[in-house]
Amino acid sequence: MKKSAWGMVDAFFDKYNLVDHHIKSYNDFVNHRIQDIIDIAEPITLEQGAYSVQTGKLEIKPPFTKEADGSKSHIFPTEARLRNLTYSAHMYLEMALSKGEEQQDFEKVYIGELPLMLKSDICHLSNLNEQELMAKGEDPQDPGGYFIVNGSERAIVTMEEIAPNKIILERIGEIEDRRARAIVTSIKSGFRARISLEYRKPRKTGVFLRISFPYVPGEIPLVVLLRALGLSTDEEIITHISDDFNYQMIVADDIQVSDPALKIEAEEMEELTKEERREYLTKSAIKYIGNRVAKGMTEEYRIRRAEDVIDRYLLPHMGIESENRAEKATYLAEMTEMLLQVISETREPHDKDHYTNKRLRVSGDLMEDLFRVAFTSLTRDMSYQLERSLARGKEPSVKQAVRSDVLTENIKHAIATGNWVGGRAGVSQLLDRTSYMGTLSHMRRVVSPLSRSQPHFEARDLHPTQFGKICPNETPEGPNCGLVKNLALMAKISEGSDPEEIENIIKKMGVLN
């Protein structure tokens, strides 16, 4: 039995590397995600002369260095370490400048350098055998999975976070307080929107269910938002939320209290047809939200701004078009019923420390965030350079407008200092070379975003769902205890899958939409 167990371990490590999760994630980032970011980026358009810039395919060339005499030569990691250079690939993007209808041909433009992960697909070391690695001055046992920036080796540590696009229910205070909250962190192409729906007893006569989401100051009654999303009549709101009579009564009370805020005139309502009544109620709700997001502006602007905020910042992962409002209303109704079930104790709140409710963000995910912000900076700088050359009366040129150091410095600085986008620090760290085991341990580290100075007793505890995923012994002593963890030796992180593929499989199983 012992023999077969060791045979299994050997078979596992014959197929998988200890830092596979970093390398595979980085390969996915380079091969697919960078192109996706470029494809969905805001197009560059200029006010003057009706110019615009089209982008095409990206080409990434393996690392080389330019010497003082102008010659180019391939550079290997050992040389980068010794000469304090950055081991990076070179990016060329197809761009074309168009004026009105006429478009110029695509030309390859050098846009900057991308720090390269050792042993990834584009790395010179990726397919070398033991002898070849030794000839290049590399240790054949070195796992790779880190970067070389300005000569120093830096590793990106895996970040742990609450699962995005998933409803998390939590109780506030004791059961007798009858207070609970449902939270969704909705993520759409790098933008994070935190939607929080709270149930609490009002102090006097007020609203039980209140919701908050980005760009809307404070909280607004849930009923108002559902009306703005198209569930305009009382009956629609109540039946969408629940079939349970007790929950329906809570929502009905909320409707009675919320409606005076919308300044709905009863006499006006009676004169309208059913369809006109629906439109009237929806418009009143949108006006209410407009008064919050654009106070003191003209009515037309307030309505337009309110609709824009609802479409773009409320549950963006479900879509940012006005057609998605009905789906968003159904999602919020479902969320409300789950929250009411927690209040009535028919459903248990979620355990935030359960590993089902966690996700690990590895190198590829973190580099994607970084590249998206860096590429936005590059397009803004390009726009500025083109405007400047037009103002000087010169013929605009894409090659001259691209300053390659904008993208290069943004990415390099973040990896060199560990200060990431979104204000996070310590995302990349100096690779631990105290011992070989220390290096492997550092490459498999998992860091929690929680503050080190607060107790967070439950977050620091060993949770039963970590069995087989997180090492039960390897964690530092002191303030980081339980917040800095390490992956178990035979734990493998999946890279994620295509959502459309999964959706098709679910539909084939006969699940109703």
Image (cartoon, rainbow, N blue to C red):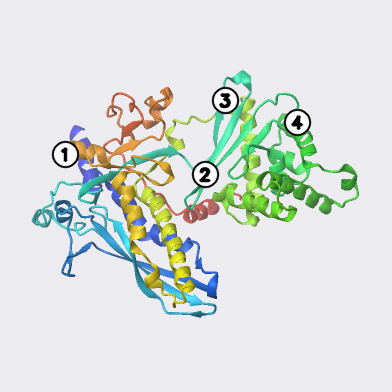
Residue 204: percent from the left, percent from the top? 74, 24
User: Label 3 vs label 2: CA separation?
Assistant: 21 Å
Marks 3,4: beta carbons within 8 A: no
User: Label 3 vs label 1: CA separation?
Assistant: 46 Å
- What residue would you read off at disc 3? 172
- What residue would you read off at disc 4? 249
Residue 331 occupies which quadrant of the picture? top right
User: Label 4 vs label 1: CA separation?
Assistant: 64 Å
Residue located 47% across and 71% down the image: 53
Residue 433: percent from the left, percent from the top? 18, 40
Residue 80 occupies which quadrant of the picture? bottom left
Q: Nearer the viewer, mark 4 or mark 1?
A: 1
User: Label 1 vs label 2: CA separation?
Assistant: 39 Å
Q: Amino acid at mark 3?
A: Ile
Q: Amino acid at mark 1?
A: Tyr
Question: In what element is the residue under mark 2?
Answer: loop
Residue located 40% across and 62% down the image: 35
User: Label 2 vs label 4: CA separation?
Assistant: 29 Å
- What residue would you read off at disc 1? 436
Looking at the image, residue 363 lies above or below residue 135: above
Q: Which one is earlier in the sequence, the residue at label 3 or at label 2?
A: 2
Residue 143: percent from the left, percent from the top? 20, 47
Q: Which one is earlier in the sequence, the residue at label 1 or at label 2?
A: 2
Marks 2,4: beta carbons within 8 A: no
Question: In what element is the residue under mark 4?
Answer: helix
- What residue would you read off at disc 2? 165
